[in-house]
């Protein structure tokens, strides 16, 4: 018997199947749909995470005053960012000496000290208190992750010039602040030379910030940003930074440290590990659904063999061989898996889209924004369809083998 004929007979069995066959297909639809939606949401969240951590600058290490014994991933959170028991050490600001020490570390590309405080911004008739950050204009535009919307970044020749965050212009000041306009910050008159796409911070030259802001020291920094050359050496660079700063600041014991070091790569690793664990847990639930569907296919195929025992006897009596019967029922079980897989792909795509739209409109902070993105790839669709077909064939192989081994005489006498 030709394979095309076996396929035709298998298709006829599927089309004329009773209700239990379609209930079995629904079980496969649910299982594959769960797999597609879970994987698409997981992959979309990973992509969103990578993009958002890219916005943070994965090649930027931040040093800040104060220290707490972190309980991060393998000790990579070397500061208060990781959470833990806060040290009683008095907080001491960072200095030019620390900047010089960091510049001499091998994997360090750029170093920028910055100061920050709250400042009163006045434009037209409206005033509001905002975060003001003084930056090294010779380095800032090269290491910042902020994107310009209008104008330019600060240059070396700027003194009383500022770059405003986009949220200040678009949200806080509803009428907007035009480029090149004059604003007042803590009594000083500044020219707006640039507007960022995001951020709610005012950026100005660090020397000017020391003059304008009251609580900023003359030779101190509130934080130091370090851009590294090789991201793969981020953890080793963090350890080197800690050791070098402890030496230059005269600190002998780790418990006496008065500074914290944070690398976004550590945060990325921790979040990805958490997401992988979550995806594995949800995948196990989907696997249970698939297992139930596979059992349903096996049950349906056993019943189908019993119902068509006489037809099997007739086919064998007119010359059908064992392999022909085996192929017919094997193709039938594979078709059940394929139909269920197609339905599962449609259901999973719809489910992931609905969940993504709910994440996008429901808030939830960073995690909510991460799960608002779904990613359905051709590889995922091909895998899901192939997987469902394989499940169908595995579930149907034993019933198909039993059908092929029936003796014609016994099959014809079967009631």
Image: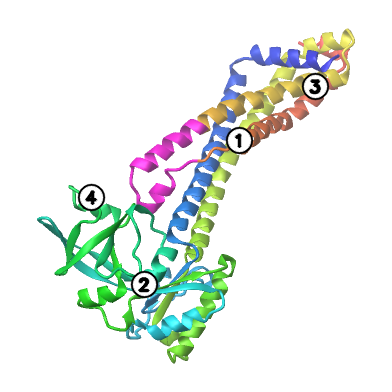
Task: Estimate the spatial distance between the alpha carbons at disc 2 and disc 1, rounded to whole Å.
Answer: 47 Å
Of mark 3 and mark 2, the one earlier in the sequence is 2
Task: Estimate the spatial distance between the alpha carbons at disc 1 and disc 3, rounded to whole Å.
Answer: 29 Å
Which secondary structure is most common in the magenta stretch? helix
User: Which dot, 2 or 1, sits closer to the camera?
Assistant: 2
Q: Mark 1: which secondary structure?
A: helix
Residues in magenta?
349-374
As drawn, 87 above or below 287: below
User: Which dot, 1 or 4, sits closer to the camera?
Assistant: 4
Is label 4 in contact with label 2 (beta carbons under 8 Å)?
Answer: no
Q: Residue furthest left?
A: 125
Task: Estimate the spatial distance between the alpha carbons at disc 4 and disc 2, rounded to whole Å.
Answer: 27 Å
Question: Residue drawn at (49%, 62%), measured in percent from left and top?
Answer: 58
Is label 1 in contact with label 4 (beta carbons under 8 Å)?
Answer: no
Residue 59 screen position, x and y as percent? 50, 65
User: Which dot, 1 or 3, sits closer to the camera?
Assistant: 1
Residue 172 visible to the viewer: yes
Disc 3: which residue? 327
Task: Give the left or right position of residue 58, taking residue 19 as reference.
Answer: left
Depth check: 56 or 79 in front? 56
Disc 1: which residue? 378
Residue 140 screen position, x and y as percent? 39, 67
Q: Mark 4: which secondary structure?
A: helix
As drawn, 46 above or below 157: above
Question: Callout 3: few (<14), some (14-19), or many (20+) C-alpha neighbours within 10 Å?
Answer: many
- Rendered image: mark on residue 136: 2
Task: Give the left or right position of residue 217, taking residue 269 as reference.
Answer: left
């Amino acid at each position: 018997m030709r394979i095309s004929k076996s396929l035709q007979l298998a298709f006829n069995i599927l089309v004329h199947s009773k209700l239990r066959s379609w209930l079995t297909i629904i079980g496969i639809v649910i299982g594959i749909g769960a797999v597609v939606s879970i994987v698409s949401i997981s992959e979309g969240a990973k992509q969103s995470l990578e993009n958002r951590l890219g916005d943070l600058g994965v090649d930027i290490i931040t040093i800040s005053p104060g220290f707490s014994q972190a309980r991060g991933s393998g000790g990579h959170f070397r500061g208060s960012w990781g959470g833990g028991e806060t040290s009683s050490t008095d907080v001491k600001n960072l200095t030019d000496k620390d900047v010089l020490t960091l510049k001499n570390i091998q994997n360090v590309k750029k170093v920028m000290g910055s100061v920050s405080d709250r400042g009163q911004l006045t434009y037209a008739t409206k005033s509001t208190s905002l975060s003001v950050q003084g930056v090294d204009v010779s380095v800032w535009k090269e290491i910042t992750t902020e994107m310009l919307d209008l104008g330019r970044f600060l240059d070396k020749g700027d003194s009383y010039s500022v770059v405003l965050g986009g949220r200040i212009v678009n949200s806080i000041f509803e009428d907007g602040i035009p480029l090149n306009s004059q604003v007042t910050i803590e009594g000083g008159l500044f020219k707006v030379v640039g507007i960022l796409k995001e951020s709610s911070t005012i950026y100005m030259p660090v020397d000017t910030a020391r003059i304008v802001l009251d609580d900023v020291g003359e030779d101190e920094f509130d934080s130091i940003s370090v851009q590294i050359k090789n991201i793969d050496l981020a953890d080793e660079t963090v350890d080197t930074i800690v050791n070098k700063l402890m030496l230059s600041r005269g600190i002998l014991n780790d418990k006496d440290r008065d500074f914290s070091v944070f690398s976004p790569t550590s945060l990325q690793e921790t979040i990805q590990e958490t997401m992988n664990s979550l995806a594995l847990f949800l995948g196990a639930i989907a696997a249970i659904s698939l297992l139930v569907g596979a059992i349903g296919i096996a049950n349906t195929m056993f019943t189908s063999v019993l119902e068509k025992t006489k037809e099997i006897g007739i086919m064998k009596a007119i010359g059908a061989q064992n392999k022909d019967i085996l192929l017919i029922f094997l193709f039938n079980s594979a078709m059940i898996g394929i139909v269920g897989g197609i339905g599962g792909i449609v259901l999973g795509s719809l489910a992931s889209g609905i969940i993504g739209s709910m994440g996008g409109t429901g808030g939830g902070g960073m995690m909510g924004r991460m799960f608002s993105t779904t990613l359905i790839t051709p590889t995922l669709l091909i895998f899901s369809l192939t997987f469902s077909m394989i499940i169908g064939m595995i579930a149907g192989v034993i019933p198909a083998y039993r059908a092929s081994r029936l003796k014609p005489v016994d099959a014809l006498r079967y009631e």
